[in-house]
Image (spheres, rainbow, N blue to C red):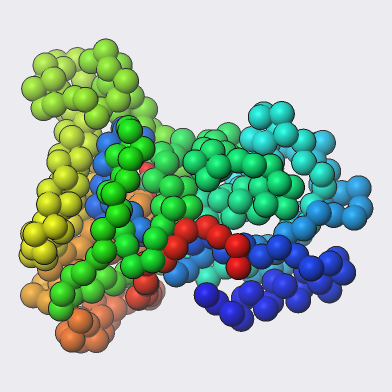
Amino acid sequence: MNLELIKKIKEKFIEGFKKEPLLVFSPGRINLIGEHTDYNEGFVFPAAINKGIYIAIQESSLAKSSITAIDREETYEFSIENIKPLKDSKWENYVLGVIAELKKRNIIIPEFNLIFSGDIPIGAGLSSSAALENGVAFGLNEVFNLKFTKEELILISQQAEHNYVGVKCGIMDQYASMFGKLGMAFHLDCKSMESVFYTINLKEFQLLLINSNVKHSLVNSAYNERRSVCEKIAKLLNTKSLRDVCKKDLDVLKSKITEEEYQKGLYVLEENERTVQFTKALLDEDVESIGALLYESHKGLSEQYKVSCDELDFLVKEAKKFKAIIGARMMGGGFGGCTINIIEKNKKEQCVEEITRAYQEQFNHNCSVYEVTLENGTRLI
Ligand code: GLA
């Protein structure tokens, strides 16, 4: 828990609204493997982390609501009755989107005030957006006793992102942020929505994130385009999603789709298979195989699914040069953000130093390195 941030949002709230707020922490997430598989009803392997969004929230005593992003020093005032998405997908939309989803479910909440801050680096692919949506949905549910289950809240968050932010995301981020467990990551079947949690023990290795510190534009449209390709293939095969498709089915389509589309479909099938193998390797405590699967996943994301970028490819290529890094891949939607690495604990410093130097030389700006711990999901503080 980031005590400093808790103190900051609480004091700011009391100063502004003369009321004790309810405090919520909503974590970001990492994903070990299973990328771009969630919206194909496939498998993912994420975990909630110790970095997240801190929210202070309480009913308003005025006839208006206000939301404040302390880190940006921005406040937006509105009335619940008159909300609409703001242009250019600003942070406000993550909050307004949740209110809109409640309205769709015939819930008109009273006016409220909300202040938030966070320690998830924005654009790092650690799902600050899902953390915020979940935090808002969870907070409103508590303050106004709306009685939604956590399962319902994550669907509200996901729909907020679809309809107010414009990203047709899967359910992985919201699920991981809401349901994370201390020290554990989990295998989630995005079709049955069943999850199995595993303690992550990588022996002499550990997880390490390296942030490329870039976020290329067109991320959202590229994401939605990938999703459409998958949906097109599924439709041509008369099935709901790629989950129930095998390579033979895909091969039959070869004359009807482009080679690029074929490779994207194939990537999804292979990434699902890798996620199954990953779970097995984890149970066998076979850390070498776990690492190898990460490198393979990156290759697929970069060459077949085409959601990587020069910076991420460079970080993974550099990682491969070290025997001490047994696996690395880009993480999340792509086109920037972090790589996730499995690195030998006592060789960490040297590797990090060399990779960050090489990165700086190549791109003329820094990458950042984070160590994260696996944490419980969205909760009251
Ligand atoms: C983003 C989306 C998720 C998922 C990942 C890629 O983080 O929000 O639903 O699709 O990209 O695995």
Tally of marks: 0
Q: Does residue 340 appear to the left or right of 150 in the view shown?
A: left
Residue 120: where, in percent of width, then height? 49, 66
Q: Is residue 114 above or below residue 106?
A: below
Q: Nearer the viewer, residue 293 or 89?
A: 293
Q: Outermost residue, right direction?
A: 62
Q: Quadrant of residue 76?
A: bottom right
Q: Is residue 287 something that shows in the picture?
A: yes
Q: Does residue 240 appear to the left or right of 268 in the view shown?
A: right
Residue at the location (72% across, 52% down)?
143
Q: Is residue 127 something that shows in the picture?
A: no
Q: Is residue 140 above or below residue 203?
A: above
Residue at the location (31% across, 58% down)?
185
Residue 55: where, in percent of width, then height? 65, 63
Q: Quadrant of the C terminus?
A: bottom right
Residue at the location (53% across, 45% down)?
150
